[in-house]
Image (tube, rainbow, N blue to C red):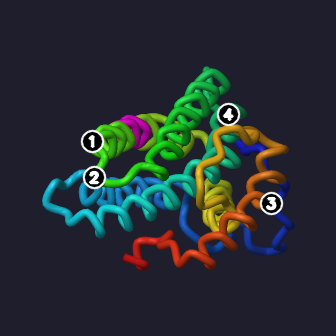
Amino acid sequence: MTLPLPPLPDVPGDESWKPAGEEIVTVLTGEHRRIAELCARLTDPATPAEERTRVAEVVIATLTRHLSAEEQYLYPAVAGTLEDGRSLAEREVAEDREILLTLQTLSSTKPADPEFDRLAGDICGKLARHAEVADGRLLPELADVASEADLIRLGNRIEVAEEAAPTRPHPGTPATPPWNKVVDPAVAVVDKVLDAVTGRPTYPKDL
């Protein structure tokens, strides 16, 4: 089955040709694992308060980028190809909005505040459920019906979209194409300027 993507150009004489890159399954399952590792640091009571503040910023930025890219490419592919795909995608988008709202609250909460632990635990619990659905159902079912070339193309688009995605939660912005593909990169410009000015860590390598 062909996913709702622009057609690839013909490559005469090489029917086995496929684009370079990793399949969307590999890209997203790896990201879910790495974000879960960050969550473990965030919720560990032994993590010093100053470090938890920085880890929280990286979790917020990483998860915001991740959800933006999934809403741009994973869920439209699910909606367009899987049985009950549209309802599955709508449910996941609604769950994403809840995660973004909680991330927004966490971003203004200090580790000394009793609410910090509750918010961090809530986010990490929702992430675990998010990863279980994506890794256990959406991605395997997508892999069953899509070509290897299309899975790689989706993986490439996810990675590009993340680099152009916001680093701060904006739960009020559009969550579906075409508008999220226009609004998210525009909002991201402002986010990244603020990150640069404040020296905010936004990637695990910044920790």
Query: In this image, 10 relative to 34: left or right?
Result: right
Which residue does the numbered mark 1 point to in the structure image? 114
**Mark toward the start of the polypeptide (2 vs 4):** 4
Which residue does the numbered mark 3 point to in the structure image? 186
Q: Would you call the spot at circle 4 few (<14 residues within 10 Å), some (14-19), or many (20 or more)? A: some
When the figure is inspected, residue 26 is found, relative to residue 135, above or below; the finding is: below
What kind of element bears circle 4? helix
Which residue does the numbered mark 4 point to in the structure image? 81
Residue 186: x and y, percent? 80, 60
**Mark toward the start of the polypeptide (4 vs 3):** 4
Q: Residue at position x 32%, y 40% from top? A: 115
- Mark 1 belongs to which amino acid? Pro
Q: Which mark is residue 112?
A: 2
Q: Which mark is residue 150?
A: none
What kind of element bears circle 1? helix
Residue 177: x and y, percent? 79, 42
Q: Nearer the viewer, residue 185 or 27?
A: 185
Magenta-highlighted residues: 125-132
